[in-house]
Amino acid sequence: MDFTRRETLALGAGAAAMAVLPFQVQAAADEAMAEFTGGAEAAMGGIELTAPEIAENGNTVPVSVSAPGATAIVIYATGNPTPGVATFNFGPLAASQAASTRIRLAGTQEVVALAKMADGTFAKASATVKVTIGGCGG
Amino acid sequence: MASGVKPRVKVPKTAAAGEAITIKTLISHKMESGQRKDKEGNVIPRSIINRFTCEFNGESVVDVTLEPAISTNPYFEFDATVPEAGEFKFTWYDDDGSVYDTSKKVAIG
Amino acid sequence: MKFKAMTAIAALALSVPMLAYAEADDDKLVTNEEIEMVTKAPAPAHLEGALDEVMSGWHFRADETQEMQRDDFDNPGMIFVETALDEWNKVDGSEGKACASCHEDLESDMKGVRAGYPKWNDNAEEVRTLAMQVNACREGQMGAEKWKYAGKEMAAMEALISVQSRGMPVDVAIDGPAEATWEHGKELYYTRTGQLDLSCASCHEENYGNRIRSDHLSQGQINGFPVYRLKNAKLTTAHGRFKGCVRDTRAETYKPGSEEFIALELYVASRGNGLSVEAPSVRN
């Protein structure tokens, strides 16, 4: 079928090219998270995860985590080839239990942050980040 | 020693005693994830900064474990308490055994 | 980065409702709380009939990407500016000189330089780009080897020199001895080529603000070049990007440093006359 340039661009306009990842990787992420919590349940709330809804580029995605009272926060990219991203261990001179960084996401997926609180309990937050593939040669 | 690895940190020069300050750190490093393949199809081995620490006058502020999913030129922003005048020491540990560090003094004022 | 073989591409817009509004945003860019960047300006006279307003590519990026240009520390392109500073002071070549040997004060000596390039060089009787001038200095004055035209040393040096013009309006001459080159560049800009039969204008003049797949098309201005592309996590030069763009239209592309790209760079730079030099900018 022949498309004129206008039609080609019109088709392209508004279309999102997305990388969708298989479900199998979720299992690896669950395992990694269970290892961190020792199998304990993580409560929702008490931890904030900030990530863009749509990442302009999967190579450099800015994210932030904050969990007042936490001793450590771990970030997981549940859809990446290996789910672990970073572990922040807060020392006595940390003014807040918060940090920002830039991460790589292989495709659209759920990013999860787990916090280990000072009292030994765990808190969890998650965000779905859509990772788009650019149009002009990607 | 990986080539061209340069650490940079942004720390205020002065702070009030007990004040919380924001610190930004960056280190130029490729962070080869171990996921890429070369032209012949061989996996390019992983070679990343795997740990970053920040201390003030010897006490820990933050100790970060990095995995390959941290972007090229690892960037961190966090808050630190400055109880007294002193020096921040920042250290990055490379998979290949190299250690990079830089420090910044902070005065009380 | 490796994408799994099972990557599926969804061609529906159902997942990007927020970004369906395609116009460039209205945000202001002030770098380091002191450099006010002009990111929108009335189009220069030669664009009458084609564009009313010229806009920096900054306006077409997501908020998180835009944020990275507000503070030099957050801008990953600045790491390369620092490596170039080391090069600037480094002795290289048979004459035992560094750039700093002749250009003693980087900031004042290079102020405004980038804003006027590419430009006609009377002695050499040619239009020179910044990269050509750097190599001319290296070969002619320093007795050093030329750098690869769009290689990482050149990109970093272009960024260092551009920083000294940051905030200043791009102002390249399109008349006089440069006119023939400028006309050639204009012709290239508007000529459709390749299997996709697209010209630069097809996307960047007729469709800026729209999306090509999920990419938000800009006007293709180069006031922000060299640019730190998040995709490659390093600096890209104008010729480097031209080469990629032409290849992406599935046309036979030209070499960085070629006559065609020199002409194109002059023309494209002139389309941004009035916008601030923003380099190194951050784009996807």
Image: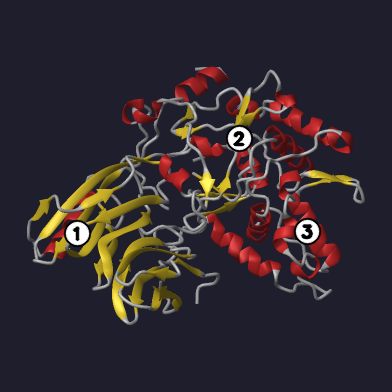
| Neighbourhood count class around disc 2 (C-alpha, 10 Å): few under 14, some 14–19, many 20 upward | many
Q: Is residue A103 left or right of residue C105?
A: left
Q: Is residue C16 left or right of residue C132?
A: left
> What residue sits right under mark 1 in the picture?
A68
| Amino acid residing under circle 2 | Gly
- The residue at the point 41 percent across, 71 percent down is B109
Tags 3 and 2 in contact by the CB under 8 Å rule? no
Secondary element type, mark 2: loop
Judge whether A79 appears above or below B59 on screen. above
Q: Position of residue A128 (x, y in %)?
A: 26, 42
Secondary element type, mark 1: loop
| Amino acid residing under circle 3 | Asn
- Residue B66 got which mark? none
| Neighbourhood count class around disc 3 (C-alpha, 10 Å): few under 14, some 14–19, many 20 upward | some
Identify the subunit bearing mark 2. Answer: C
Judge whether A88 appears above or below C269 on screen. below
In the picture, residue C52 is in which quadrant?
Answer: top right
Closer to the chain start, of discs 3 and 2, is 3
The verdict on a common chain for dots 3 and 2 is: yes
Q: Is residue C55 left or right of residue C88?
A: left
Q: Position of residue C126 (x, y in %)?
A: 87, 45
| Amino acid residing under circle 1 | Pro
> What residue sits right under mark 3 in the picture?
C135
Q: Position of residue C256 (x, y in %)?
A: 71, 47
Report how far apart the C-alphas of labels 3 and 2 lie in the structure: 26 Å
> What residue sits right under mark 2 in the picture?
C220
Residue C239 in view = yes
Identify the subunit bearing mark 1. Answer: A
